[in-house]
Image: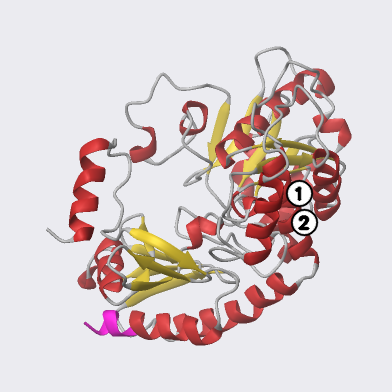
Amino acid sequence: MSITETAIASAEAHSAHNYHPLPVVVASAEGAWMTDVEGRRYLDLLAGYSALNFGHGNRRLIDAAKAQLDRVTLTSRAFHHDRFAEFCAELAALCGMETVLPMNTGAEAVETAVKTARKWGYRVKGVPDGMAKIIVASDNFHGRTTTIVSFSTDPEARADFGPYTPGFEIVPYGDLTAMREAMTENTVAVLIEPIQGEAGVLVPPAGYLPGVRELTRERNVLFIADEIQSGLGRTGKTFALEHEGVVPDVYLLGKALGGGVVPVSAVVSSADVLGVFRPGEHGSTFGGNPLACAVALEVIAMLRTGEYQQRAAELGDHLHRELGLLTGGGAVEAVRGRGLWAGVDIAPALGTGRDISERLLEQGVLVKDTHGSTIRIAPPLVISKEDLDWGLDRLRAVLKG
């Protein structure tokens, strides 16, 4: 067996099969490129589902992490540390909010938001105890905890994990009328992705997100925006909601916030909303640790320049123009997305999204399939136009067969 085959066989022998990775074993990476254990190079057009917005081994982020590693990495929230206050203040300012509750993973941020909304509903809105409802959208992806899969409509994510957590109403994504009809006096929040990533980079109809904002204000309901994949530069703005001039009550952030170095997530909102928590009611040993704060502070500083948002906007326009030319020829049925983020629906006659991903792998390009026929393209925001075009050329070649 080759080095790659041996490594894959060993992984499959000693790890749970909760993922089905492409048959590549990465040994190193820099910028938008990965190198496998046999020295082959691949263009990364996935960027860790947006966790690597700033590329692999970004020097500013690695240097920030190394400097912090020599000082202190973990205190737990039992004590203050000297990076925490600055991180919270800077992230709150970036979001135009007041208060930050830091966690580690995106799923933890979503779980925290669910608890926040319920507690706010009982303490502030006056919903009877145990009656709080949160409206979510079909085809959502917010994580894989027991609570989160309870309101998933994906059978693969949900099946065999019951009994499920109650308290959620599911309505069609993009359907404002259905959302309005689902609201009651016990509704405490609407939790949605401004763009549904796992569903195939689905962009809602124009006016939908402003309509959600108006409806939630009208009914005294929190608007919780899961910007874990869409936020922090991916769409050409700091937040995807900015494209429609919408500001939610709560931002959920993760992935890119850790710069591809450490897991960092956060719930960001007003003092009135996050002020419902008291000591001991919620927390995390690693949430807001010094190493995480040091890296995230550098991420925030990089975003403040606007450079990465501009790159995503300009290269995103180019990406969508080029992908749009692939439709109508029988190989690609549809292209969706915004900024450096696209979902490409492959014609069934050419194979599944997995088939196309494996053929691209052979050509030195890494993407990931979703929902059978779709591939997602989301390169690091630092990718050059030349490298992006090289990857698109490989896609064209694969689609031609």
Where's residue 228, x and y in %? 61, 49
- The quadrant of the rendering that contains the C terminus is bottom left
Where's residue 227, x and y in %? 64, 51
Instruction: Please count the marks in the image.
Output: 2
- Write down the region rendered in magenta: 396-401
Image marks 2 and 1: residues in contact by CB distance under 8 Å? yes
Real-space Cα separation, disc 2 to disc 1, in angstroms: 7 Å
Name the one closer to the observer, 306 or 196.
306
Name the one closer to the observer, 286 or 226.
286
Direction from residue 73 to residue 363 in the image, left or right: left
Q: Which mark is residue 246?
A: 2
Which residue type does callout 2 highlight?
Val
Q: Residue at x 82, y 23 (%)?
A: 276
Q: Quadrant of residue 332?
A: bottom left
Direction from residue 249 to residue 256 in the image, left or right: left
What secondary structure is found at the residue carrying circle 2? loop
Q: Residue at x 41, y 18 (%)?
A: 163
Return the disc, 2 or 1, that comes first in the chain's sequence: 1
Can residue 107 be seen by looking at this rendering?
yes
* Prevailing SS of the magenta stretch: helix
Q: Residue at x 70, y 27 (%)?
A: 76
- The quadrant of the rendering that contains the N terminus is bottom left
The local crowd at label 1, few if under 14, some if 14 to 19, many if 20 or more residues have their Cα within 10 Å, is some
Vertical arrangement, residue 261 with respect to residue 397, above or below: above
Can residue 245 be seen by looking at this rendering?
no
Which residue type does callout 1 highlight?
Arg
Which residue was labeled with disc 1?
Answer: 213
